[in-house]
Image: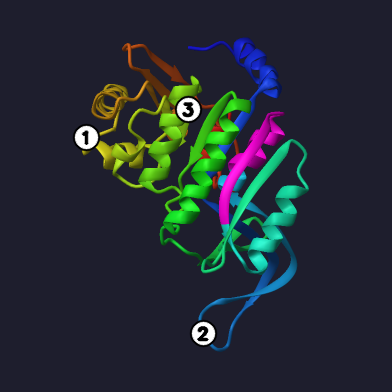
Amino acid sequence: MTEPSELVQLVENLSQARVLCVGDLMLDRFVHGSVDRISPEAPIPILQINNEISMPGGAGNVVRNLAALGANVRFITALGNDSAGKELSVLLNSFDRVDPVLVVDTGRTTSIKTRYLAGNQQILRADQESTEALAPELADTLLSEARRALKDSDLVVLSDYGKGVLSSDLIQGVIEGAREAGKPVIVDPKGHDYARYQGADLITPNLTELEGATHLPVTNDDEVIAAAQKLIEDHDLSAVLATRSKDGMTLVAKDGEVTHLAAEAREVFDVSGAGDTVVAT
């Protein structure tokens, strides 16, 4: 078990990190209001809107976390030529410590997740998104930008939300470039095909993702360790950090070393973005 004092020192050192982040960007929109009656048109609540807040989501939330922790971030992604894309560009360029490289795909709709909240209770989420793969020439542009940024970065974070930015070829191109440059690669995965992350240094699946990728049970410590070891062996990974909700996290290294990090209970009303915080830290 890692002592809290050791973790504090590690967190203090984060301000020295230079991070290259590549991944799927989206706009997170939060519509806050109150509910005091039901619609006469259908059995649904009527939300009286008080205010709206927008912020970068997906890989953009990873970037926000990195910057909040004091890291300097080069962020490479693609977005659409639309109002949401323009709003994200303004937001990202306003952050200290963030250097965004935004490739515009004129045929793409920028992904938007809109959450409607009454008080602290989320009552609805509406998604508008693109999931098709980037055109090959745009993917090549992202890869070229990523390889160029590697020389000024200490490590790479790939934040995969399955929205089409991170193709298998782009992921492997970044991993190969990072290996050549001697820079570690951390991956927040999506889906069940982890062959696309072959050769990464650290991957951070939650329990559902770990079970789906390995087809193994993950109900206790031993099962989580066995599933993580299978991922490592199958995909030439250096380590797996399995996030386990109330049971904390388990780090399994290629050499067999296992570290359990316990969770501390907290009163929360929304756990969205927890995985982004883990991969950023």
Task: Kindly identify which numbered label has been placed on residue 178.
Answer: 3
Residue 66: percent from left, percent from top: 64, 34
Q: CA distance from mark 1 to mark 2?
A: 44 Å
Q: Is residue 272 visible?
A: yes
Give the side of residue 233 with respect to residue 95, left or right. left
Mark 2 — residue? 42
The region drawn magenta spans 62-78
Distance from Cα at disc 3 to Cα at disc 2: 54 Å
Q: Which residue is mark 1?
A: 216
> Relative to 164, is 42 above or below?
below
SS class of the residue under badge 1? loop
Residue type for callout 2: Ala
Where does residue 5 sit, x and y in percent of width and height?
A: 64, 10
The image shows residue 36, relative to residue 97, as above or below, that is below
- Disc 1 or 3, which lies upstream in sequence? 3
Check if residue 236 falls in the magenta segment. Answer: no
- What residue is rendered at 34% in x and 47% in y? 191
